[in-house]
Amino acid sequence: MRKSDPDGVVLGTLASNYNIIRCDRVKKRGGESKTESHELLVVDLRVGTQSTRVILVYRVPALSQTNSAFIWEKLDDFTKCTHPTVMVGDFNLPDIKWPLDSQNYNGVNIDFINCCTEIVGNLEQLPNYGNSDHSAFKFQLLMRTEPQKARYVKNFRKADYAAINSLLSNIDSLLFFNVNETVNEMYEKLIHLLEQIIGKSVPLMRIDSTRKPLPGHIHRLSKKRHDAWIKFLNDGKPSSKKRFKKLHVEYIHE
């Protein structure tokens, strides 16, 4: 859109620095390119330790089922994630027979939500925005969050090794250990000394226990899978898709 619209509606505020703004054109196709047959927007939302993928879909009404195959392939790819997925949007599929409680726009219900009731609740249909013929949907994502539990460990990477060496080098072992002490007593005395030095020279590091670190080989496999996915998005080649699927299966099995 190349001009400002004083009637643009602020739909809501996410935070102090972000606003959601809706601005519709008078004619159809609210601002997107006329040459596009579809639009897909994929967003991964993470709350605490749980993620949910939201996919927004728009399909041109005149697009044939044969030409729509590319959309279904993309949706198949985007739904291969391991976390719950919600699909919302305008699919423009007139042959779908949905049980309706009330008719909407001559009996055609083009805006709907595909989801599982376990992850979406409090669904509400809202009025139209401006000149748009689309209804808005308001719903709640049912994402369980775990309390943030933290523990503290010694961060030996940031230890003051110069101070440790200085303390140890200035200890006279002949005076420190009593000849009348047993081996076990000397050992306990040495351990106590080392614990005191470590406590003074090694800082603590907070570890969030809800973050479960992955082994190195899984991290490497995850990166390969991510790189393969980006390559497939860029070139769209069957070979790139095949490689991504292969790495995805390996990652899931791990």
Image (cartoon, grey):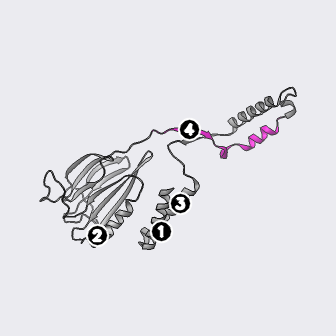
Q: Is residue 169 above or below residue 4?
A: above
Measured as percent of width and height from the top left, residue 126 is found at 21, 50
Q: Earlier in the sequence, mark 1 or mark 3?
A: 3
Measured as percent of width and height from the top left, residue 12 is found at 29, 48
Element class at badge 3: helix
Q: Residue placed farthest to the front in the image?
A: 253
Q: Residue at x 82, y 35 (%)?
A: 171
What type is the residue that disc 2 sits on? Ser
Quarter assignment of residue 60: bottom left
Residue of label 1: 243
Element class at badge 2: loop
Alpha-carbon distance for marks 2 and 4?
A: 51 Å
Quarter assignment of residue 26: bottom left
Residue of label 4: 151
Looking at the rendered image, the disc whose residue lies closer to the viewer, 1 or 4, is 1
Query: Is 152 part of what is drawn in magenta?
Result: yes
Q: Residues within 10 Å of mark 4 (few under 14, many from 20)?
A: few
Q: Residues within 10 Å of mark 1 (few under 14, many from 20)?
A: some
Alpha-carbon distance for marks 1 and 4?
A: 40 Å
Residue of label 3: 221
Alpha-carbon distance for marks 1 and 3?
A: 12 Å
Residue interval drawn in magenta: 147-171
The label number, if any, that marks residue 173 in the structure image: none
Residue of label 2: 68
